[in-house]
Amino acid sequence: MKKTLIIGATPNPERYAYEAAHMLKAKGHDIVNIGIKKGELAGIQIEKPSIPYHDIDTVTLYIGKDVQKEYYQYILDTNPKRVVFNPGTENQELEDLLTKQGIEPVEACTLVLLSTGQY
């Protein structure tokens, strides 16, 4: 399975990022958790963004447009194949930057993609 980087990872079980991490792991996907909260999620430590990973297939966003700007360069340097903009995270400016670098922006819900076998 290809590796997914979750931006906005949180140990809070009431958040969609929490659900997505557990569903990704249950379906056999490797994950990397990036967030501001300390702790672990689905058995993986939550890290702060520092050195970009270079083996990421998908970045899935769980942070709003107003916070994303500080992650632009990190995402571009990670150079995933695609970035999933979950509902409420849509951002045309970032989508344009991704497209220019050859990264596919996808406006979708990670949970739905996983549930329907489209992930």
Image: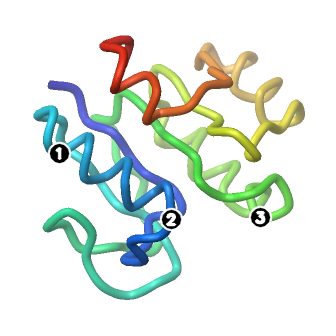
Q: Amino acid at mark 2?
A: Arg
From the top left corner, tell me how far across and down residue 80 is, in percent.
45, 29
Q: CA distance from mark 2 to mark 3?
A: 17 Å
Q: Which residue sits at x=34%, y=25%?
A: 115
From the top left corner, tell me how far across and down residue 91 is, in percent.
83, 38
Asked whether 101 or 96 is in front, the reply is: 96
Q: Which mark is residue 58?
A: none
Q: Which residue sits at x=37%, y=54%?
A: 19
- First in sequence: mark 2 or mark 1? 2
Q: Which mark is residue 15?
A: 2
Residue linked to disc 1: 25
Residue at disc 3, secondary structure = helix
Q: Is residue 6 left or right of residue 23?
A: right
Q: Name the image quarter holding residue 56.
A: top left
Residue linked to disc 3: 67
Asked whether 69 or 63 is in front, the reply is: 63
Colour scheme of this structure image? rainbow
Q: CA distance from mark 2 to mark 1?
A: 16 Å
From the top left corner, tell me how far across and down residue 79 is, in percent.
49, 32
Residue at disc 2, secondary structure = loop
Task: Judge the density around disc 2: few (<14), some (14-19), many (≥20) Cα neighbours within 10 Å.
Answer: few
